[in-house]
Structure formats: C-alpha cells, structure tokens
Image (tube, helix red, strand yellow):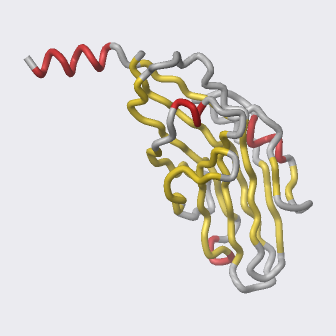
C-alpha cells in the first residue's frame, strides 16, 4: 500500500525551474555584462557570462540574481525540494581561494553557503536548500555568487553563466 501512495504522490508533483530576471546587483565596477547572468530560460545554457575581473590581493566579487517568479505555486502547496544551480568558471583556479553561492530573502540567509568546485571550464554546482513558499515568492528572494581572490595581485576572472532555481512541489 505504501508503494501506491508514493507513486501517487510522485505523479502529483510539479516541477518549476526559473532563472532570475531582475537586474543583477554587483559589488563594484569590476563586473562586465552582468545582465548575461539572467539571459535565457532553464534548461538553456546560453554560455554568455557576467564576468568579474580583479588584480587586487584578496579581493571579493559578488553578483546577486533576483526576479525568480514562483507566483504560479499555489498557497498551501507542499514544497518537496528546492535546488539551486550556479554555472560558472574561473580563468585560473590558483588565483582564487573560494567560490560560493548563498540563498537570501532580503538580508536573511537561507541555509548554509554552498562551496563550489573551481574549474577553468564551465561547470554546475548545485545543492538543495529549504526556503519556504513565502520566501520563494518574496520580492527580495535572491541568490548571491561570491568569488574570493587569493593573496596575490595577479589578474583573475570569475565568470557566471546563470543561477537557476528549481522547485518541486505538491499542490
């Protein structure tokens, strides 16, 4: 009997994938083509990048993506999972100490920061987080991707293709 219930629950699950549509917020003037982080729709991979370039020792660059529209999820829906995926690359992984992404509702963090694997070719770093429906539908819901440079003045480039959020829910 429990197998039938699981199968039935799975059949009623709905998946909604979104890419941010808001104007990205960055920390400084060292970002180029920031709007490239919000072009296309999931699962498309436009391979156009927002890029942060810096030669400042231990500099930190971030980009915040917002405008995820989850208004189609009805009130009272049960959120089964929320997966966040950052597609990124670094021009030289030895010139960075960390790359992470973090989910926010305004200034409030949702879950822990996700440490990414740095790579010189585009890769996806994804993990499941637990925002509520109210947070997902909040006008201040956003995802921030942050790169921290190594203690060096060698030029480094952090590139973000997109940050997608996929919600699975039962109505």
List the single residue furthest toward the left. 1
Q: Nearer the viewer, residue 139 or 37?
A: 139
Residue at 68% from the left image edge and 77% from the top image edge: 95
Residue 17: name its quadrant. Answer: top right
Residue found at the far right of this picture: 29
Q: Residue 128's x, y, as percent?
A: 44, 45
User: On screen, 132 above or below 143?
Assistant: above
Nearer to the camera, 49 or 170: 170
Tell me what residue is drawn at x 76 percent, y 47 percent.
49
Q: Does residue 148 sit above or below 171 in this rendering?
A: below
Does residue 55 appear to the left or right of 85 in the view shown? right
Q: Indicate the position of residue 120 as horizontal and vertical percent values.
A: 62, 62
How far from the left and from the top, in percent, is residue 90? Answer: 67, 63
Question: At x 24% / y 14%, what residue is drawn?
Answer: 8
Find residue 119 and report its horizontal and vertical position in percent: 58, 62
Q: Residue at x 50, y 53 (%)?
A: 111
Left or right: residue 34 compared with residue 18: right
The answer to whether residue 119 is above or below residue 83 is below
């Amino acid at each position: 009997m429990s197998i039938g219930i699981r199968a039935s629950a799975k059949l009623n699950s709905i998946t909604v994938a979104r890419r941010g549509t808001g104007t990205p917020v960055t920390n400084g003037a060292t970002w180029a083509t920031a709007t490239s982080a919000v072009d296309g729709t999931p699962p498309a991979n436009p391979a156009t990048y927002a890029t942060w370039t810096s030669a400042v020792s231990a500099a930190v660059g971030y980009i915040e993506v917002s405008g995820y529209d989850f208004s189609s999820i009805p009130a009272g829906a049960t959120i089964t999972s929320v997966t966040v995926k950052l597609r990124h690359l670094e021009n030289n992984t030895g010139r960075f100490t960390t790359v992470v992404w973090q989910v926010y509702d305004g200034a409030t963090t949702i879950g822990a920061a996700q440490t990414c694997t740095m790579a010189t070719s585009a890769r996806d770093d994804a993990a499941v987080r637990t925002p509520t429906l109210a947070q997902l539908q909040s006008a201040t819901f956003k995802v921030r991707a942050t790169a921290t440079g190594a203690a060096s003045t060698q030029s480094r480039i952090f590139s973000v293709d997109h940050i997608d959020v996929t919600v699975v829910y039962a109505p």
